[in-house]
Amino acid sequence: MQEIQEILNKLKDNNWWVRKNTIENLLAYPEDSYLSILEEWLRNGDDALLRNAAMEAFSTLGEKAVRSLILLLKDEDPDVRIFAANVLGDIGNAEALSSLIPALADPDVNVKIASAEALGKIGSEKAVTALAKLIGDTTWVTMAAIEAIGEIGGDNALSVLHKCLEKEEYHGMTFAAIEKAGTHHFIRHLTPFVDKETGLRELALKAIVAIADREGTKPMPSYFTSLIPLLIDLQHSARPEFKKAAFIALCWSEDMRGFQYFIEALNDEELQEYAINGLFSLGKRAVPGIIDALKKEGANRVILAKVLSMLGENSALLRFAGDDDAEVRTEVALAIGNLKTPKATEILLLLEQDAIDEVRAAAQLSLRNKKDTGKLA
Amino acid sequence: MTLSKKDLMSEEEFTLLKELINKEFGIQLKGDKRLTFHTKVSHRLNILGLKSYRDYYEFIISDSSREELFTLASHITNNETYFFREKMQLEVFSNLLKGIKKERLKKNQHILKILSLACSSGEEAYTLNILVQESGLFMWDWDIRIIGIDIDKNALKKAKGASYTKNSFRLNGNIDIVNKYFTAEGDRYNLRKIFTKNVAFRHGNLLDINSFTDINDIDVVFCRNVLIYMNDSAISRIIKNLYNSLTDSGYLFIGSAESLIQRTGLFSPEYNNGIIVYRKNQHRHCEGQSPEAISRRDSSLRSE
């Protein structure tokens, strides 16, 4: 017992790292030996240090703490109940459902909110009906309920959210929830909002893109045709989440007006994949622009060279045989192997002497292929 | 024109290669990045005469020399670098040099050791050398050693050549830097010889302790924009390697979008002119031990 007490005392250490290791050590002991002490600490509202230490320990103990936390959810101190609900949500154990659902009727508004959030994290559809009853409560409670319903998802959740779209004051929170719970069948309910006023259309667009991207069911390019000015306008938005959604839509639009944004995004790890798709979707129309971009400083030349090669623009690559980047030269060496011109052979012979092994290997392969093709001819 | 990802590479093939890279180098490819992967790696299939990414995977795992594994890693890592990148961090570095010199002199040492990790084609390592030389603090009788480490042999070859093009700069019309430190030759900018001395490059994997052989007592480590691509266990291993490489008073710079806060007990952040620089916590040499174990041992050292 004294051993446990000594370990528990270390939980009060100022160093986060020491506290973290202490909790890990605690896991080696039976929980009966320390949980009641931690419960006591948590109830001790006069000593913030003890309370914080207990909170940290409960959060890390996870499953082992569930029964204690369910008990604490009925504590007379609302702060303790809020904390218990928060941690139960983080643990995500469905055992807590039967205690969290009644806690949605707690007299304390913050306990209600914490319980709704916890149910959202646990993600059981059993909680949707109880959560739906909170819609219409105060704004914060309604917001927490809608968010939780979005986290849970499923048909029942979506039909509640669809109904919420009828109320203007719930739009913001509802779109965010639909973004998480929506399926591609639901996109048709969002489309009318894209033509609505500023603010709403961005939210709707973001939800549509998130759902389509997640499900791998992007709309036809024509879906975006009338939206191009908006999508381009949003590339200058101060809200990165709107900018990103509009960028993805632009990539799916197959519209040349997106070209310059695709080039810029090739250096953005998060958007690179969409940008390559966008460039490729433009086909031959993109070729002159790609060649120009290849000449500029800061461009992602390896990807640009590869896109040219994938588009079959092998002769356009000839002029980049002296590029500073060995990966570009490699791509050139592979691509121009198909060209039956003396210039291509001359460049391949030069690249065969390159300082970088990979470039030489690519040039040799292309020269060999040329020879074999010549023999066959 | 539409591009079908699955025609280029199946999900299964992507997962195989993604997990291999994660296991061997700690690099995490987040999300479905098959197109990006294809643009960076497809030429290897051509050169090796392989038909599919499955064949490529088999080739890599059966290659006992591990050459192709390193080649793959060098292609999927981001090589973006340029001279004088993130100027505010570099200013802080310059301001720290005086204190670093003082620490060395206290130990009666005339040596300055700097590490540039994931150095790619050497722009960062040479930038640091320029700043050290421009400080005028280490002029007489000082042994300056700046070491760059990278996984990409081709990039290291370029680094050793110290010859660059406009792509290694973000000049925005201002060519002062180029005029001062480089000699122009056609479209190439060759770093002046005086700024190439003191700098050496070596091939290595930051996760591998062997890559840090003989690298110790370092004053400053630059490891920028590396950890953001790594998984948690790789980050822990790299941090331990960095901890062991640095002097007790050493400094660690990571990327401005990266953080070690609540990730390790080995380093603490220090704020310097709006920039976070990490310092070693005052433990002794660490080799895979928990900070608690170090603290225990430290207190036993004190009681001796």
Image (cartoon, coloured by chain):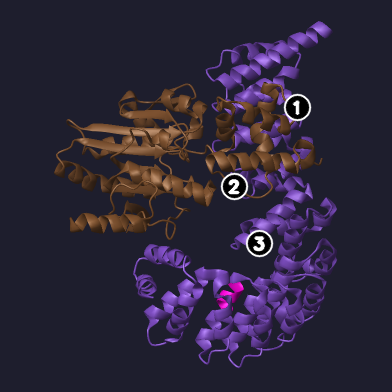
Chain colours: A purple, B brown
Q: In this view, does A77 lie to the left or right of B277?
A: right
Marked residue nearer the N-terminal end (3 or 2)? 3
Q: Is residue A89 magenta?
A: yes
Q: Is residue A42 left or right of residue B200?
A: right
Query: Does residue B72 show up?
Result: yes
For the residues labelled 3 and 2, the Cα–Cα distance comes to 16 Å
Query: What residue sits right under mark 1 in the picture?
Result: B51
Residue A187 sits above or below residue B211 on the image: below
* Residue at figure coordinates x 59%, y 27% from the top left: B68
The magenta-colored residue range is A85-90
Q: Is mark 1 on a helix, strand or loop?
A: loop
- Of marks 3 and 1, the one in the foreground: 1
* Residue at figure coordinates x 45%, y 46% from the top left: B237
User: Mark 1 and mark 3 in contact (Cβ < 8 Å)?
Assistant: no
- Of marks 1 and 2, the one in the foreground: 1
Task: State which chain disc 3 sits on.
Answer: A
The residue closer to the viewer here, B93 or A80, is: A80
Res. A161 image quadrant: bottom right
Residue A136 sits above or below residue A230 on the image: below
Query: What residue sits right under mark 2 in the picture?
Result: A268
Which amino acid is tagged 1? Lys
The residue closer to the viewer here, A194 or A219, is: A219
Mark on residue A335? none
Q: Is the magenta stretch mostly helix, strand or loop?
A: helix
Q: In this view, does B65 lie to the left or right of A279?
A: left
Task: State which chain disc 1 sits on.
Answer: B
Query: What residue sits right under mark 3 in the picture?
Result: A242
